[in-house]
C-alpha cells in the first residue's frame, strides 16, 4: 500500500516535469491577413505560458505584415526574415513544433504538391518527414471563410474551390493539424503535450507506467464529470482536463478565471456548479 503511494508520488512528479518543461516552437507567418490578429493573440498566449518562440516571416509576409509591426504586437526584439536567413536547419531543428498562424492558399498549395522552392514550404516538408508536429490556421486559405466574402473574394468557380479543398485534404493526410484560428492556442498546447509523451522511450514509459494512460487516469480522478475540488479553476486546469467527457463539476463558490471560461468555451467544455 505504502509502495503504491510512493510510486504515485514519483509518477505524478515525472508527469508534471514533462508537461511543464519549456516548449519551443517555430512560428512561421506567410503573407496573408485573414486571421492574423487572432493568430497573434494565440502566439502571445503561448508565450505567456512560457513557450520559447522563434518567429519567421516569408518574403510576402515581410511585405504584407511588416516586421516591426509583428515585433510590436508580440513584444519581441528578434524576428527571422526569409530574405536574410541562410541556414534554415538552425531555425527548426530544436523546435518541438511548427506553427503557421496564417496559412495562405499559395503556401498550402505548395506544401500539398511538395513544391519546396521557398523557405516555409521547405521547412514544413522537412518537419513532415521528421514527424514533427505542425499546426496551421486554415482561415486564410479557406475560400468559404466569412472574412473572404466581406473582402469580395468569394467569386471563385466551384472547380477552383474544390481544387483548394483537395489540397487541404492532402495537408491533413500529411499529418498537418488544420484548425480554425480561434482554436490555435488550445490545439497547440494539447498537440505538444501528446507529442512530448510520445517522444519518451519505451523504457521511460515502463518506468512511469505509460505516461499517457496515467494522465488519463489522473484526469478522471481529478473529477472530469465529477467534483473538481480546488478553490480556483484555471486555464491550465481546463487544458489538462480537455480529454474528458466535456463536463467539469465545481462546487458553488469555486473561482473560475476569465481565461478558464474562454478556454472552456473554445474546447466545448461545460462548467457545472453544484
Image (tube, rainbow, N blue to C red):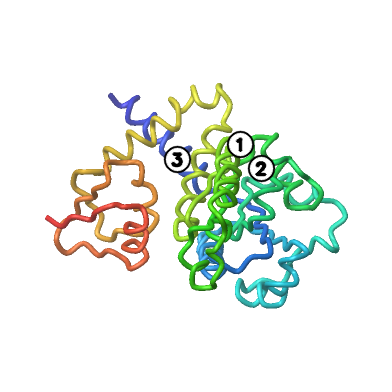
Quarter containing the C terminus:
bottom left
Q: Position of residue 155 (x, y in %)?
A: 54, 63
The dot on residue 112 is 2
Secondary structure of residue under mark 2: helix
| Neighbour tally class for label 2: few under 14, some 14-19, many 20 plus, Cα within 10 Å | many
Q: Residue at x 84, y 63 (%)?
A: 83
The dot on residue 35 is none
The disc, 1 or 2, on the residue closer to the chain's N-terminal end is 2
Disc 1/disc 2 C-alpha distance (Å): 8 Å
Disc 3/disc 2 C-alpha distance (Å): 41 Å
Q: Residue furthest right?
A: 86
Q: Which residue is mark 3?
A: 13
Above or below for 1 versus 254: above
The dot on residue 174 is 1
Secondary structure of residue under mark 1: loop
Q: Residue at x 32, y 66 (%)?
A: 257
Image-quadrant location for residue 44? bottom right
Q: Position of residue 143 (x, y in %)?
A: 53, 58
Q: Is residue 110 left or right of residue 173?
A: right
Above or below for 119 versus 223: below
Secondary structure of residue under mark 3: helix
The disc, 1 or 3, on the residue closer to the chain's N-terminal end is 3
The disc, 3 or 2, on the residue closer to the chain's N-terminal end is 3
Q: Position of residue 80 (x, y in %)?
A: 77, 63
Amino acid at each position: 500500500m505504502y509502495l503504491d503511494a510512493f510510486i504515485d508520488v514519483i509518477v505524478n512528479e515525472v508527469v508534471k516535469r514533462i508537461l511543464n518543461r519549456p516548449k519551443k516552437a517555430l512560428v512561421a507567418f506567410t503573407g496573408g491577413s485573414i486571421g492574423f490578429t487572432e493568430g497573434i493573440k494565440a502566439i502571445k498566449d503561448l508565450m505567456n505560458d512560457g513557450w520559447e518562440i522563434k518567429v519567421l516571416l516569408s518574403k510576402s509576409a515581410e511585405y504584407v505584415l511588416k516586421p516591426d509591426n509583428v515585433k510590436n504586437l508580440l513584444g519581441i526584439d528578434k524576428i527571422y526574415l526569409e530574405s536574410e536567413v541562410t541556414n534554415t536547419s538552425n531555425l527548426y531543428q530544436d523546435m518541438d513544433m511548427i506553427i503557421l498562424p496564417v496559412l495562405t492558399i499559395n503556401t498550402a498549395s505548395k506544401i500539398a504538391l511538395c513544391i519546396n522552392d521557398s523557405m516555409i514550404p521547405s521547412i514544413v516538408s522537412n518537419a513532415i518527414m521528421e514527424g514533427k508536429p505542425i499546426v496551421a490556421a486554415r482561415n486564410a486559405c479557406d475560400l468559404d471563410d466569412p472574412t473572404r466574402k466581406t473582402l469580395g473574394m468569394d467569386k471563385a468557380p466551384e472547380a477552383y474551390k474544390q481544387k483548394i479543398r483537395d489540397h487541404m485534404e492532402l495537408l491533413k493526410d500529411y499529418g498537418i493539424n488544420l484548425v480554425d484560428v480561434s482554436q490555435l492556442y488550445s490545439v497547440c498546447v494539447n498537440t505538444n503535450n501528446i507529442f512530448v509523451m510520445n517522444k519518451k522511450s519505451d523504457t521511460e514509459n515502463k518506468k512511469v507506467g505509460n505516461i499517457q494512460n496515467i494522465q488519463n487516469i489522473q484526469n478522471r480522478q481529478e473529477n472530469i464529470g465529477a467534483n473538481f475540488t480546488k478553490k480556483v479553476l484555471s486555464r491550465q486546469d481546463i487544458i489538462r482536463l480537455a480529454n474528458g467527457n466535456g463536463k467539469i463539476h465545481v462546487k458553488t463558490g469555486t473561482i473560475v478565471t476569465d481565461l478558464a471560461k474562454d478556454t472552456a468555451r473554445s474546447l466545448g467544455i461545460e462548467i457545472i456548479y453544484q
